[in-house]
């Protein structure tokens, strides 16, 4: 009887461990905006989305790269302001290993390259590619 109880208890403790998904390693690209958005703010979002979808289809499909658009003024999103030292609309890339963010960069040059779509695309592509190499 003791063996049966011990076996049952062991199964109860072991099964949940096997059912859990292992933490992912990936790159997350965030576009952060507020409630008020100017023409250029929309354009940064558009160009970012287009560049990511054009150059990283496979990585998006596999989950190696995730793209999120987040309104920092919505409830529960305010922490991103402090987390990433945000002061304006921003494109942030984040490297996640074993479920923990290990580094991030604010791609501040997106503002500089707004007047040149291809330079914007190339900048986003190059920065994300560097992060993907670290997976």
Image (tube, rainbow, N blue to C red):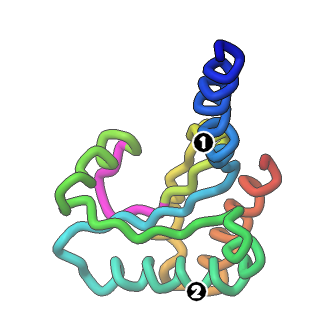
Left or right of 38? Residue 132 is: right
Q: CA distance from mark 1 to mark 2?
A: 27 Å
Residue displayed at 50% across by 53% down:
106
The image quadrant that residue 16 belongs to is top right
**Range drawn in magenta:** 85-91
Quarter of the figure with the N terminus: top right
Residue displayed at 63% across by 69% down:
124
Left or right of 74? Residue 84 is: right
> At numbered mark 2, what does the secondary structure look like: helix, strand or loop?
helix
Instruction: In this rendered view, identify the residue nearer to me: 66 or 118.
Output: 66
Disc number at residue 99?
1
Disc number at residue 50?
2
Image coordinates for residue 56, horizontal then vertical, percent: 72, 76
Instruction: In this rendered view, identify the residue nearer to me: 132 or 1.
Output: 1
Disc number at residue 121?
none
The relative height of residue 115 versus residue 66 in the rendered view (above or below) is below
Instruction: In this rendered view, identify the residue nearer to me: 79 or 44.
Output: 79
Magenta part mainly helix, strand or loop?
A: loop
Image coordinates for residue 102, horizontal then vertical, percent: 61, 36
């Amino acid at each position: 009887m003791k063996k049966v109880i011990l076996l049952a208890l062991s199964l109860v403790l072991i099964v949940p461990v096997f059912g859990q998904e292992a933490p992912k390693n990936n790159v997350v690209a965030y576009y952060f905006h507020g409630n008020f958005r100017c023409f250029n703010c929309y354009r940064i979002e558009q160009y970012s989305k287009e560049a990511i979808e054009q150059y990283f289809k496979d990585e998006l499909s596999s989950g190696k790269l995730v793209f999120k658009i987040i309104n920092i003024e919505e409830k529960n999103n305010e922490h991103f302001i402090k987390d990433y030292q945000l002061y304006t609309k921003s494109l942030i890339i984040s490297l996640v290993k074993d479920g923990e963010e290990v580094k991030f960069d604010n791609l501040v040059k997106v503002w500089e390259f707004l007047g040149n779509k291809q330079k914007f695309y190339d900048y986003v592509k190059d920065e994300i590619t560097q992060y993907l190499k670290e997976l």
